[in-house]
Image: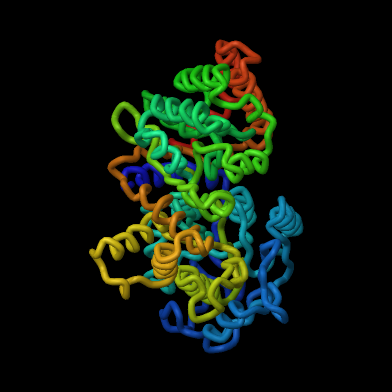
Amino acid sequence: MKKTLGILIVCALMVLTACSGNNEKTNNGGTSGGNSNGAGTVSEPADPYAPMSETVTIEIGKEAAVDPKLPDGSTIEDNELTRYFGEKLNIKYTNAWQATTSGDAYMQKVGLTLSTGDIPDVMTVDKQQLVQLVNADLIEDLSSTYESFVSPALKAAYDSTDGYSLASATFDGKLMAFPNVSPGADAQNLLWVRQDWLDELGLEAPKTMDDIINVTKAFMDKKGSAGLLGNQVIVNIGTSVFGFDSIFSAYNAYPQLWVEDASGNAAYGSIQPEVKDALAKLRGWVEEGLIDKEFAVKKSEQVNELVVSGKAGIFFGPWWLPFGMLADSVAQDSKAEWVSYLSPLSQEGKMNTHMGSPTTRYLVVKKGFKHPEAVLKTLNMQFDADQLQGEGIVEKDDFNWMNMPFSLLVSNYDDKEKKAKLVQDVIDGNAAADTLQGEAKQIYNSYLKDKENPKKDLAAWSQRHAFLTGALPLGKDDQINRKVGVYYDQTDTMRTKWANLRKLEDETFLKIIMGNEPLDSFDGFVDKWKSQGGDQITEEIAAAAK
């Protein structure tokens, strides 16, 4: 994991060089009461949780949940969480505007706001929008605020990415935003298998790709299974349910990921020769009927139903699937036993997996806002509240992090597997139960409840198995080869040509897999990709590395 994160830092520095290269502005405050040289008008003691001496009002551009599930009388702006933070910190939170997470509603609203230059005190943006704000000199330098007021817990979360997240928000040595941190577990896929079917048929857990194919054949022959599942999204760097990411990775192919080639240069994973080998395998399995040809037209809901109805028993997906369709599967058939495996293994005996960027969102503070420390104190408390799942603030099961003042979630990069390991240590007798707190304590309680009455409380079953069956194996660092991209953002040419290049890629891969085009059409795709903007993009990424 250390090696993985070290590469991520290099990636962040590459991006920042590209983003700040044309920024000739120097953010030195300039507004009365502003954060001069990142220091701000700081009259509060350097206590990350101390209330403000005078009430501070923060106007927020709020990203709201589509269904916040708030109790009667509460709103997005005024609820148990916002009131708790407000009372503890002497801060009044108001929403200058709000838009939901539905589709692109929130990002469209941010885009409109940027076009006027009249931004709220605080809002969440993506990387491209952050660059625009930095270049327009519209946001505060938060460097000194961070140094003075970050809590130990929040700092540890940022440190868990070995500096990548903060580096991605730093321009010309200045921290210009507070970044999110997504758990690394979310981008790694596991092989989910009906263990009860394996046991019934006397089959060993599949380790290699050949094993997976043999199990798939057995499930089809003996259980009437639909075969190895797939869906319309062949690969996705990030969450990928039913995708073929793991199959490509098994052949050392990493589509959609910018990788380092043998010469140490940035190269696009989708055009590497290993991808052709993986496509050939997929094409053959579709031809054999081991992968249903209809995967290309089926929507996720239709594929989900195959799992729920007991017509499928093997597929790839993330650790958290017990929270969704696997719980529905168990509800339909209490005999269903779903287990995840680190599979397929490479010739080196490790599971290869791509990694997504731990940071994609940024909390920015308007230039001239007098108390940026109030923003960071809020973020400190939000991190703690999320780690405790709202314990002591809201009723159990009523916690929704998006109902907190800021719609920015910061987790430890190893959050899921770490909590799973803490709970497993208690189960194994290597630690005391009273050492657990927050979500880890909830997981343990779910384990106890489900152990006592298996599958009677599906909420308990889901939490137990998502963490102890799904996330726990991801802590076995010596058995996983994590492939980190060297670039996750957009270059100038990508903003205008990437959509067409992705369409070309998706259509070509699908036609090859389905047998509608010869395998060698991959070579033609590579040539087209290069000539239609790919080479130019590669040069831009290479320049960012200098």
Above or below — where is 9 with respect to 416? Answer: above
Q: Is residue 356 left or right of residue 101?
A: left
Q: Position of residue 324 (x, y in %)?
A: 57, 53
Residue occupying the point 39% across, 41% down: 341
Q: Position of residue 133 (x, y in %)?
A: 63, 55
Q: Position of residue 539 (x, y in %)?
A: 52, 28
- Front residue of this view, candidates 32 and 102: 102
Residue 438, image quadrant = bottom left
- The residue sitting at the left extreme is 430
Residue occupying the point 67% across, 43% down: 301
Q: Please identify the quadrant where the C terminus is shown.
A: top left
- Asked if residue 539 can be seen in this view, the reply is no
- Front residue of this view, candidates 49 and 347: 347
Q: Is residue 390 left or right of residue 262?
A: right
Above or below — where is 188 with respect to 222? Answer: below
- Asked if residue 534 can be seen in this view, the reply is yes
The total number of labels drawn is 0
Residue occupying the point 37% across, 70% down: 152
Residue occupying the point 57% across, 41% down: 310
Q: Is residue 346 left or right of residue 410?
A: left
The way the protein has been coloured in the rendering is rainbow
- Front residue of this view, candidates 319 and 31: 319
Q: Position of residue 540 (x, y in %)?
A: 54, 32
